[in-house]
Amino acid sequence: MKLINAPIMRIFHLNINAPNRTAFVNEGKHNMMTSIKNEPGTLFMLAGHDDKLGESNYVIECYQDEEHYQIHANSPQFKHYGQVAKKIITGTEMINLKPELVKTSTTIF
């Protein structure tokens, strides 16, 4: 896929309480896997955490353009994720990035 405009790329820092971690991870994984499978303009998504308990989480996502982001934002799996996340997330920060290079493969870790 050749990109004409710079894609939309964001990092989210999402804080949760450890007892809610399993539900948070499961719902996030379902959202990501469904999005990658069904939304051609969702270029990549990844998630991870930087602490022992998994309370400090990061999601990085990249969309071909605003139109494709809106497809994702209006998808059933994202709406469901949003309903679950608003009960679990205790703090959030979003950072919009200005992409310089996007290189992906089909490998899922």
Image (tube, rainbow, N blue to C red):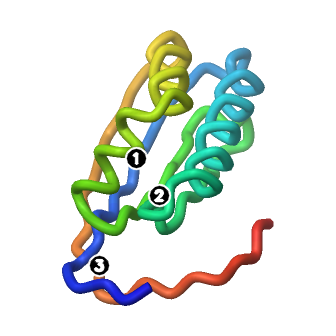
Q: Secondary structure at mark 3?
A: loop
Q: Secondary structure at mark 2?
A: strand
Residue 47 in picture, x, y percent from top left = 60, 52
Viewer-proximal residue, 76 or 87?
76
Q: Residue at x 46, y 60 (%)?
A: 42
Looking at the rendered image, the disc whose residue lies closer to the viewer, 3 or 1, is: 3
What amino acid is found at the position of numbered circle 3 in the picture?
Answer: Pro
For the residues bearing labels 3 and 2, Cβ distance under 8 angstroms: no
Q: CA distance from mark 1 to mark 2?
A: 6 Å
Residue 72: assigned label: none
Residue 96 lies in quadrant? bottom left
Q: Which residue is mark 2?
A: 60
Left of 12 or right of it: where is 15? right
Residue 98 in picture, x, y percent from top left = 22, 74
Q: Residue at x 73, y 16 (%)?
A: 19
Left of 11 or right of it: where is 32? right
Residue 12: assigned label: 1
**Mark positioned earlier in the residue sequence (3 or 1):** 1
Q: Quadrant of the C terminus?
A: bottom right
What amino acid is found at the position of numbered circle 1 in the picture?
Answer: Phe
Residue at the farthest top position? 87
**Mark positioned earlier in the residue sequence (1 or 2):** 1
Q: CA distance from mark 3 to mark 1?
A: 15 Å
Around disc 3, counting alpha carbons within 10 Å, would you say few (fewer than 14), some (14 to 19), or many (20 or more)? Answer: few
For the residues bearing labels 3 and 1, Cβ distance under 8 angstroms: no
Q: Quadrant of the N terminus?
A: bottom left
For the residues bearing labels 1 and 2, Cβ distance under 8 angstroms: yes
Q: Which residue is mark 3?
A: 99
Residue 57 lies in quadrant? top right
Whether 92 is drawn above or below 41: the answer is: above
Q: CA distance from mark 3 to mark 2?
A: 12 Å
